[in-house]
Image (cartoon, rainbow, N blue to C red):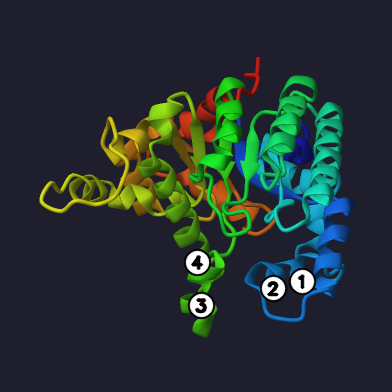
Amino acid sequence: MSPARKKAAAKSSKKSSSKPSYRRIATEEAFSTPEQMDAMREILAKTTEYHPDLFLWKIQTDPNGPVNKALLDLEGERLRIMDRDGVSMHLLSLTSTGVQMMDPDRAADVAVAANDRLAAVIQRHPDRFTGLATVPPQDPPRAIKELERAIKKLKLNGAIINSHTNGEYLSDKKYWPILEAVADLDIPLYIHPRAPIPAMAAAYRPFHLEHAIWGYQAETGLHALNLIVSGVFDQIPKLKIVLGHMGEAIPYWLYRLDWMHNIASIKFDRPKLKQRPSDYFKHNFCITTSGMNWDPVLFFCISALSADNVMWAIDYPYQESHEATEWMNKAPISEADKHKIFHGNAERVFHIKKKT
């Protein structure tokens, strides 16, 4: 072997040893569509007062902004970054706030177009992309109709709803038919963050804490906790919910939630539950690591929930792909747990075909 070939072989060997052979499925990866961008630009044009979600949308719709091109580009730079970092697959979802700020008719149309575009790109790249269906929760019958089409016809792998819709949570019983449809289809529902409901947002405003620094997880954690104490999991025991950002802080509070929910000396007007709040979280929820590339919280969540309930995510393009990948590559956990978190749990929860 020539010196040049020996040098190339050594370089290749070093590169492969630095990236162990994992199938890396990233489970909270955002994209957008021209239809979504156009609809949100129209809403922005009609709005004069500050709105925390529209603050983000002003950035997202800016062609010269930091994320616009990355959201719209599925088959160019995104794939190159995935290849660079050894990411096998993105589980794609329409970026927050999805279609939930649109009027019902426009929301339904944009959801259908997004799901069609998503299915088409998955068909072109079946080994690189899979995806979650967008639905218009502000119109439950149409949400159910589109959910069934997206799962049965388009073969998508779950659904996503971006926390509240018009200030309302899925714990409101008018939304339970959507949750029943999710369970009947045997798919998970990813509840993704958005800014807090108006009733909460004012307290976050002085220092712009209503965004991802704090408000998103506070909002989404409250949404999930409302679901737990509403009794919906007693009525729909097969319902599976996925939360990002290491569970939106709920794992840390499980002991206190159980203790406070069980206080007999104080009578609260809450539905009577068959189990403790922590039991529902461990049985009916999974979490992803999106935006939380930190060993201490990873150790804690594995300890509290088991590695079977934790999935890896990047939160592209809002977080750095390289950082998330290298963090999990080097995470000081067992190889068995690393395989579960990188791909095994996602394959099971989202019904993603295993690599042969």
- Mark 4 to mark 2: distance in Å? 14 Å
Kind of residue indicated by mark 1: Lys
Q: Can see residue 26?
A: yes
* Residue 58 point in image, percent of width and height: 77, 71
Q: Is residue 200 above or below residue 221?
A: below
Kind of residue indicated by mark 3: Ala
- Mark 2 to mark 3: distance in Å? 15 Å
Tell me the residue at 73%/41% (across/down): 83
Label ID, residue 202: 3
Callout 3: SS: helix
Residue on which the image places disc 4? 215
Viewer-side residue, 65 vs 13: 65
Callout 1: SS: helix
Residue on which the image places disc 1? 58
Kind of residue indicated by mark 2: Phe
Residue on which the image places disc 2? 55
